[in-house]
Image (cartoon, rainbow, N blue to C red):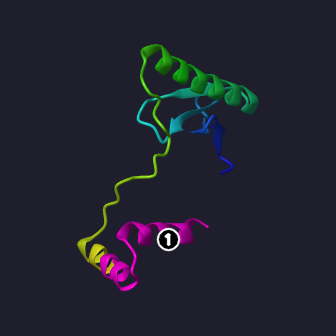
Amino acid sequence: MSNLLEYKGYYGTVEYSAVDKVLFGKLIGINSLVSYEGISVNNLKKDFENAVDDYLEMCSEAGIEPEKAYKGSFNVRISPELHKKLALYSALHGQTLNSTVEEAIVQYVT
């Protein structure tokens, strides 16, 4: 993941604005909008880490639980025909639908 920043279990994008001549990004995997910017890679990384720390501090002060970047569940929309094929495949192999989908994703991303 060469184009992502990571700090305290949070990940952020790295983008460049040619108009503003600045690097910028935002945290991914959470609903809250947390952004950062910098004029160099080191500056961007420092602002990213400060943004994560500020987010965690804000949550603490407000008495709310910070969002977890990845909870391990998400919704996927597929065609009814593919859903049927997946369910039949799972049943024939003695697996749950979730375990079949997880297995397929592991094979795809590794």
- As for residue 96 lying within the magenta part, the answer is yes
Query: In the rendered view, would you say 29 is above or below 102?
Result: above
Residue 97, percent from left and from top: 36, 70
Amino acid type at image mark 1: Glu
Residue 100, percent from left and from top: 43, 72
| Res. 20 visible in picture | no
Query: In the rendered view, would you say 21 is above or below 86?
Result: above
In the image as oriented, which residue stretches furthest toward the top?
Answer: 61
Say left or right for 24 vs 102.
Answer: right
- Report the residue marked by disc 1: 103
Query: In the rendered view, would you say 55 is above or below 4?
Result: above
Determine which quarter of the picture holds residue 47.
top right
Determine which quarter of the picture holds residue 21.
top right
Q: Residues within 10 Å of mark 1 (few under 14, many from 20)?
A: few
Element assignment for label 1: helix
| Res. 18 visible in picture | yes
How many tags in the picture? 1
Q: Which residues are magenta?
A: 86-110
Say left or right for 11 vs 63.
Answer: right
Residue 60, percent from left and from top: 49, 18
Q: Which one is in front, 18 or 22?
A: 22
Q: Which residue is at 48% across, 72% downward?
A: 104
Characterize the magenta stretch by its predominant secondary structure. Answer: helix
Q: Which residue is at 68% across, 29% downward?
A: 44
- As for residue 87 lying within the magenta part, the answer is yes
Residue 5, percent from left and from top: 65, 39
Determine which quarter of the picture holds residue 110.
bottom right
